[in-house]
Every structure is written in C-alpha cells, then in structure tokens.
C-alpha cells in the first residue's frame, strides 16, 4: 500500500541520517530492520465526502427531509455518504428505529418509524454527518399513521 499524504504542507522525514523538512520526498528512506532503503512516497489529493441527499453546511438552517406513510408501511429516510461518516442525532416525540448508533460511523444511516394499527407516531430528528473535515446537517420529520 502506498503512503499517501493529504495537504500541501512541508513534512519532516528521516532521510537515513537526519530529519528533513521538505515537500520533496526524493530522498526518503525507511528502516526495513537491517538497512535504510529508499521508498516511494506519493503526495495525494485531499479526500472529499459527498452526501445524498445533500445536507446544509449550517446547523442553524439544516436541510429538511420528511416521509409520511400509512399503515402497514413505514416512514423511512436514508442518507448516504461516499466514505464512512460519523453520524450524530437526537430526536423528539416517538423513537425511530436507526441503523447506526449516535456517534457511530457508516456509509449510510436509515431512520424508520412504524406504527401499529390504530396508532399515529411522529418523530423529529436532528442529524449531523461528518467526514473528511466536512459536516452537514439535516432535520428529518417521520410520520407513520395507523389510524385508517
């Protein structure tokens, strides 16, 4: 596996005889247990994340998502991330079923609310997803109506 750095900063590395601060990695050596050997180092691009549906960059005005379903269906919202994201959420009213614990990491998160016959459940969820230095925000409204 290649060693990949992100960012455009000078790095310190051991060249076999001293620590060097540089952006030029042509003389980088690593100890293999018996001798110093030149290694190939690749400067990579920063990793980015995309969310679908996309969220807001402002916690004060989050992206609003909702689902309303009538018994026997469930109200469900899923948000996907292109790389694993850390998901943090809280809810008011009825507790939804959630695919990832708050503070957990995954490529997606799904909230589901299911009401039994002759019941009405409602949940408002505040959600943030963070990865690669980016945080997005959503408010999710789920309503599941069993009063048919």
Image (cartoon, grey):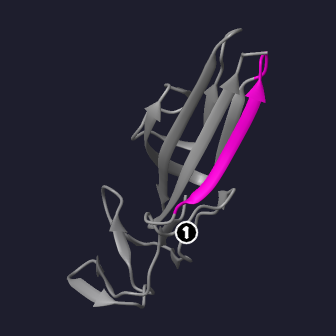
Residue 71, horizontal then vertical, whole percent:
77, 17
User: x%, y% of residue 43?
Assistant: 51, 79
At horizontal 50% and vertical 25% (from top left) the residue drawn is 94
SS class of the residue under badge 1? loop
The foreground one among 24 and 122 is: 122
Most common SS among magenta residues: strand
Count of numbered marks: 1
Q: Which residues are magenta?
A: 62-73
The magenta stretch spans residue 72: yes
Specify the quadrant that holds the N terminus.
bottom right
- The image position of residue 56, as x and y in percent, is 55, 66
Point 35% across, 68% down: residue: 30
- The reply to whether residue 81 is in sight is no
Give the residue pinned by disc 1: 47
Left/right of residue 24 with respect to residue 51 in the rendered view:
left
Quadrant in the picture for residue 98: top right
- Residue at 57 percent across and 68 percent down: it is 48
Picture layout, residue 119 above or below residue 53: above
Give left or right: position of 28 versus 141: left
User: Per the image, is 131 magenta?
Assistant: no
Instruction: Report the residue that reaches farthest toward the left.
Output: 18
Whether residue 33 sits left or right of residue 46 in the image: it is left
């Amino acid at each position: 596996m290649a060693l990949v750095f992100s960012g455009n900063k000078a790095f310190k590395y051991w060249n076999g005889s001293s620590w060097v601060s540089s952006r030029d990695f042509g003389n980088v050596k690593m100890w293999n247990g018996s001798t110093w050997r030149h290694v190939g180092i690749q400067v990579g691009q920063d990793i980015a994340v995309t969310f679908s549906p996309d969220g807001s960059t402002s916690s004060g005005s989050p992206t609003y998502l909702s689902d309303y379903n009538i018994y026997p269906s469930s109200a469900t919202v899923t948000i996907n991330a292109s790389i694993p994201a850390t998901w943090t959420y809280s809810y008011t009213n009825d507790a939804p079923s959630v695919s990832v614990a708050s503070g957990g990491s995954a490529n997606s998160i799904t909230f589901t609310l299911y009401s039994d016959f002759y019941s009405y459940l409602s949940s408002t969820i505040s959600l943030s997803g963070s990865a690669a230095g980016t945080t997005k925000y959503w408010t999710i409204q789920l309503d599941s109506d069993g009063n048919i």
